[in-house]
Image (cartoon, rainbow, N blue to C red):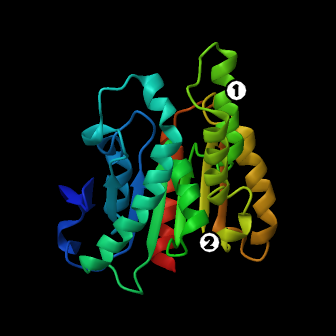
Amino acid sequence: MIIRSEKWQEIPVLHIVEESKEKERVPVVLFFHGFTSAKEHNLHYAYNLAKQGIRVILPEAKLHGERSKSLDEFQLALSFWDIVLTSIKEADILHDELVNKELIDDETLIGMGGTSMGGITTFGCLANYDWIDAASVMMGSPAFTRLAKGQISYAERGGREIPVSQEEREQLFAALDQVDLSQNPGRLHQRPLFIWHGEQDSMVPFEFTKEFYEEIQKDYVDQPELLKWMPDENAGHSVSRPGMLASVDWLAQHLRAR
C-alpha cells in the first residue's frame, strides 16, 4: 500500500492506494477530517478502504494541519463555517484534479466521507455535487443554518463576545442555506448514504441528524438498502470501532457494486 504526501492545486493531501492499483482507474473516496484534527488522523479509514481496492484522498482543511496558523481554539472556531464552505469548494477542485491526473473517467465511481466537521462538509457536498456516487457520514449534521445559529447562541450564553455583526451573520446564514441539505433533501437523489451518530454527542446535535434521516426515509422506500442509519445510544462525539468499520465496509460495498 502506498501513502503519498502531495499537493493538489495547493491543497495538501495524503493519497492512499494499493501499489498494484496505483495507475488504475479504481473507485475513489475523498475523506474529510474533523475540527482541530488533520488529514493523517483518518489514516485508519483510508487503510480499511484501500485494502478493499479503493483509492483514498485525505485533504487538509483550511487552517488545519499543514495549513494551520497561530490561532487558539476560539479564534479557529470563529472560522468554522468559512473552513467548511472552503472545503466544499475545494472538493470540486480535487475532483477536477482526479480528472486531470486521469485517475477517473465517466465510469469511475466516487465516494465521499468524513467525521464531525468532515461529515458536515460531506453533507454540504451532497447538496452541491452530482458527481458523488455514495457517501458515509459520521457525527455530521446536514442542518447547517440551525447548527450555526445554535453555536452562536451557545457561545453568547457562555459570555463570549462574538465579533460578528448582524449583517455578517445574515450573510453567513444566506450562504449556509445554499448548501443546507436539511432544507434541500431532494438534492440527495436517492444516492447511497450511510449515517453514524452517537446519541450522547454534545458537539454536533444527534437530534438534527435523526430528524433528517426520518425525513429522507420515504425517498428510499423502493431501495431501502441504499440508506443506512446507525445510531449508537452509548457514544458521544467519538466514532466507535464498529461504527468506523461499518461505515468503511458499506461505502466500499456500494462503490464496487454500482
Picture coordinates of residue 72, whole percent (x, y): 39, 22
Left or right: where does residue 46 sit relative to residue 101? right
Which quadrant of the rendered structure holds the N terminus?
A: bottom left
Residue nearest the viewer, comparing 231 with 106: 106
Give, as a three-letter code, the residue at label 1. Ser
Q: Is residue 83 above or below residue 186?
A: above
Residue in view at x 59 percent, y 16 percent: 160
Give, as a three-letter code, the residue at label 2. Arg
**CB within 8 Å, label 2 to label 1:** no
Q: Is residue 100 visible?
A: yes
Secondary structure at badge 1 equals helix
Left or right: where does residue 157 sit relative to residue 31? right
Q: Which residue is mark 1?
A: 153
Residue in view at x 68 percent, y 45 percent: 145
Q: Is residue 236 above or below residue 12?
A: above
Secondary structure at badge 2 equals loop
Q: Which residue is mark 2?
A: 191
**Which of the 4 image quadrants contains residue 18?**
bottom left
Give the number of marks: 2
